[in-house]
Every structure is written in structure tokens, then in C-alpha cells.
Image (cartoon, helix red, strand yellow):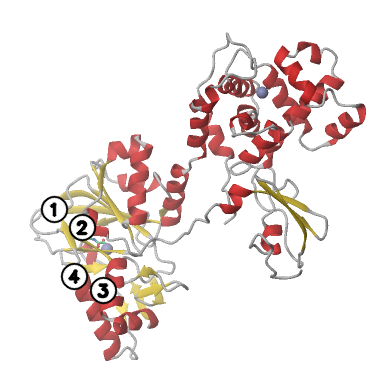
Amino acid sequence: MLGLVQTSLGLSAEWLRDNCRCGQCRDAVSGQKLFDLNEATAVAEIVESPHEVTVVFDDGHRSVFDRAWLASPVPSGHRDESTKVFDAGLVSASWPAYLDDDAERLRCLDSVLRNGFVLLRGVPTRPGTVLEVAETFGFVRETNYGRLFDVRVVKSPNNLAFTSKAISPHTDNPYRDPVPTLQLLHCLENATAGGDTAVVDGFAVASKLRTVDPEAFEALTRTPVTFSFSDATTFLSAFRPIIDVDPADRIREVRINNRSMQPGREHGTEFYRAYRAFRALLTEAQLSFRLEPGDCLLFDNTRILHARSGFSATGSRHLQGCYADIDALASTAAVLRRTPVAELAAMFDGPGGAAYLGEPVTQAQHMLLAGGKAVEAQAPDHLVAAALLHDIGHLVADEKHHDTAGARFLSRWFPPAVTEPVRLHVAAKRYLCATEAGYLEALSPASVRTLGFQGGPMTPDEAEDFAAGPYAEDAVAVRRWDEAAKDPAAAVPAFSRFAPRLERVIRPTRPA
Ligand code: OGA
Ligand code: ZN
Ligand code: ZN
């Protein structure tokens, strides 16, 4: 059974081997893959249980997979081209709410990812603030225009943006490769007649072009064109199609700018007909509005075209802009969207309120106290997480062995540095009872009772094996906080107090 042979799980042996999550195949802290698949792998045996699938490979390696993890959907990185940006009109938010409220911030960042843009209102009109806006979700992309650029009328402008002329719908810096994927425009002053703004969803319009004029769509996706910019100190040039599609033929980028497009001599009637057809549809789909002082438009520069009408020379108009990239914005949104902490909090709130095997505290109180002990001991984040979550297995339905059940449950989100001490915290009790005088005597009555069916104190051989394991010390540390966390009179820390530490040790559920 070599090569691409599918196992009975519908997954190749290679995929399974490559995705093993054991402590030998993944780094304990980062969760990054240590194992490097170089040779053909075959599956020798598959052992299935209700919650786990154990795969034994021909070299003897055993990989245990959580069924829920195997069945979980793989997230797609593609931005949905079918979204109709203007169905929702202008998506806007107030700057103070954006700053103070994570949910509001996520709504705004999601709007950029899904609709292509968001309008933040009430951003202080202090010059330079546009950079602070970019820094709330990512990194400023410095260019030949500087970290930020001033859009206002100047003498001898190197770009038509710095005149009072109308500017037709365009994406910025198409002559750059890679192109800045995000743009911000912050209005400091707009006291002229004219100078209104318009935006258009390039994805929605390109998608419409594909339907109404497939030849034009083809021409614009298959014909690269040169865009260039030059001034005294800069010469930039990129050769790209106006509409770019991914390998699945989905629209992934629109690059269009009349000012800097330099079609070659080979760009004949067919190209220009297609270009005009696209431009006509873009013009129809524009959404116009006026930027007021304090407005900051944040948009996907690979999707949303922007434009302005001409304005009069009297009265002044001043915008500041900067570029940034959408990967960091998507990352910030993904981190804000992370749900494990919320899910764990809900478990502590709900099932965690249950009595804990004859102890005078509830399961949740017990775990919160154990986490608190780890914090007091200035333990690293992963051990605080292990202490806080060590008995989570009790809260997972119908589990006999709460240590292994807990570790398996947590492995969806946490690396072995967290899950291994959890898996070993019962073994650590048996170890301490065997090796430390007075330990057993100090256990709570309930803990002594469970020790019986957990196998009693370890034999000297078992203790030696246990102590030689890589996570023995951490498991023992967790165990000591566990024992110290049963005092009904102790002040119980809130779950939210642990959230930042948990966030820091949570890993993506699937490697990218
Ligand atoms: C720009 C631009 C629009 C405006 O600077 O890229 O398009 O409203 N400016 O001045
Ligand atoms: Zn522009
Ligand atoms: Zn416990």
C-alpha cells in the first residue's frame, strides 16, 4: 500500500503521516511540524474508537487523531467575489467604538474582507493619524511617496492626484509589484466645491462582465499590460492583466488606472473594446459620497476602485493617505475571531458549575483556583493553561478517563506543552504518592478514593519510567497546583483573567 493509495478513512497515508500531531512530530510550544515527509509511507493498521482513530504506519509510528479534528472543515483563504458590496450601502463605524470594542473592530475588518471597504468616522483630523489607523490592524507600507502621502494641490505635481482634476475610478500604484493591497484615505479638510469621492466594487463588476461580455472578460484576464510610473528619482513598472483570476478561475485582483497604463503596440482593437466595456460597467456601478473631515476610508486596493470629482481652486481640500497590506488585516481579524477561549469560557460557565466528586468546590472553581496557583508561581503561559484546564475532561460528555479525554479535547487548540501535562496529571498523582513521603496522607478524601480506581501509587518501575518522560516535571507541577485548589474559602479568579495567556498558547488547528 504505497504512494497515493487512500486509506479506509478517505485520506492518503502521506497526508495522515504528514499531519501527525504527537509530541515527536510537532514542536511542543509552537506546534510547528518537526517531521519531514521524504519517503513513501504505508499504513499498517487503523484502529477506530468512538472518539479517536489510531493509525499505525509501516515503520511502527503511531498517530492518534481526534475524529472531530479530522472532520473539521479546512478554512479557505479566498475572498468571495460574489459579494455585492453596495447591497449594504456604505458600511461605516465610529472611530471611538472601533478602538474600544473588539466586536466592532472585527465587524469593520470583516467588512474590508467581505465588502472590500469600510468608512471610519470621527478619526481625529490631526495630521499623521492615518498611520495610527493602519497600525491598529497591521503595518504601514512605505513607498516612494513616503510612509504617508498628502493629497492636496501642489505646484509641479508628480501625480495627477496632487492637482484639482477629476480622477476616474482606479486602483492605486498598479505599477508596483507586489501592489499595496490596502489603501487608507483620511480626510483632514474638504472645503471646496466638488472633490466628491466614489468607490466601485471591481470584483462585482468584473463578475458581471464575465456574464454579459465573456470575450471582453477573457481579453482582460489573458492580456497583460504594462503600468509604469516615473519621476526624477523613481521608475516603477509592472506587467499584469487588468483582471487576474486564480487557478480555480475566481477573480482575485483588479488592477486598473488610466493615468499609468501603458498598453503595448500589440494591444489592438480587441483589448480596447474590452477595456471600454469594463470601464462602462464600472462607471455605472459607482457609489458616490463626500468625505468629511474625520472620515477615513479603508479599502482593498486589489478590489475596490476609487475616484474623485474635480474641485474648484478656491477653498482647501486635504487628504492624507497611506498603504498597508491585507494579509495583516486578515490575520488581525482571524485572531479577533478565534473562538476557543470563548468556547472554554462557556464550558466553565455551564457544565463547570457541576459538583466535583465530593470536593467542596465546583469543577470550574477548582480549575480556576489551580490556574491561579500557577499564576502565583509565575509559571509560563503553557503551564498556567495546563493548570487551568487540567480537569476539562470531566466536562466532556461521558468520559471515564478524564485525563486522556481532556488532553484529546484540548489538542484541537493547544500544543503538547499544554496537553501533555493534562494527560499526565493523574499519573503524576500516582507518582507523587509513590515517591514523596506524606503526599498520600495529605490528599483530600475524594482524591484518595479515586486513587484506588486510578491504579494506586506507582510501583518503583512505573515511577522510574514516568520520571524519565519529557513532561514529567510539568505534570508534577500541575498536580501540586491541582491539590492546592480545593479550598472553599479561597477567592476564585475570573476566567477572563486567563484569556490573554490562553490566546498566547493557542495554535491554528491546521497547518497552513
Ligand atoms: C489618490 C486618490 C482621491 C482623492 O490619492 O490615490 O485617488 O479623493 N485621491 O483625492
Ligand atoms: Zn488613488
Ligand atoms: Zn484537578
Percent position of residue 303, x then y? 33, 64
For disc 4, the marked residue is: 283
Q: Which one is nearer the viewer's eye here, 371 or 461?
A: 461
Q: Which mark is residue 152?
A: 2
Instruction: Please state if 195 lies on the left or on the right of 100 as rendered.
Output: left
Q: Which mark is residue 165?
A: none
Which residue shows up at 65% across the image and 45% down it? 50
Cα–Cα span, label 4 and label 3: 16 Å
Cα–Cα span, label 1 and label 4: 27 Å
Mark toward the start of the polypeptide (1 vs 2): 2
Mark toward the start of the polypeptide (3 vs 1): 3
Mark toward the start of the polypeptide (2 vs 4): 2
Q: Quarter-wise, where is residue 313 in the image?
A: bottom left
> Marks 1 and 2: CB-CB under 8 Å?
yes
The kind of residue on which mark 4 rests is Thr
In this rendering, the label closer to the viewer, 1 or 4? 4
Which residue shows up at 30% across the image and 74% down it? 260
> Marks 3 and 2: CB-CB under 8 Å?
no
For disc 3, the marked residue is: 259
Query: From this viewpoint, is residue 19 visible?
Result: yes
In this rendering, the label closer to the viewer, 3 or 1? 3
Q: Estimate how packed mark 1 is, as few (under 14), some (14 to 19) or many (20 or more) residues with alpha carbons within 10 Å.
A: some
Instruction: Please state if 255 lies on the left or on the right of 347 as rendered.
Output: left
Percent position of residue 10, x then y? 63, 63
The kind of residue on which mark 1 rests is Ser
Percent position of residue 149, x then y? 30, 56
> Marks 4 and 3: CB-CB under 8 Å?
no
For disc 1, the marked residue is: 316
Cα–Cα span, label 2 and label 4: 24 Å
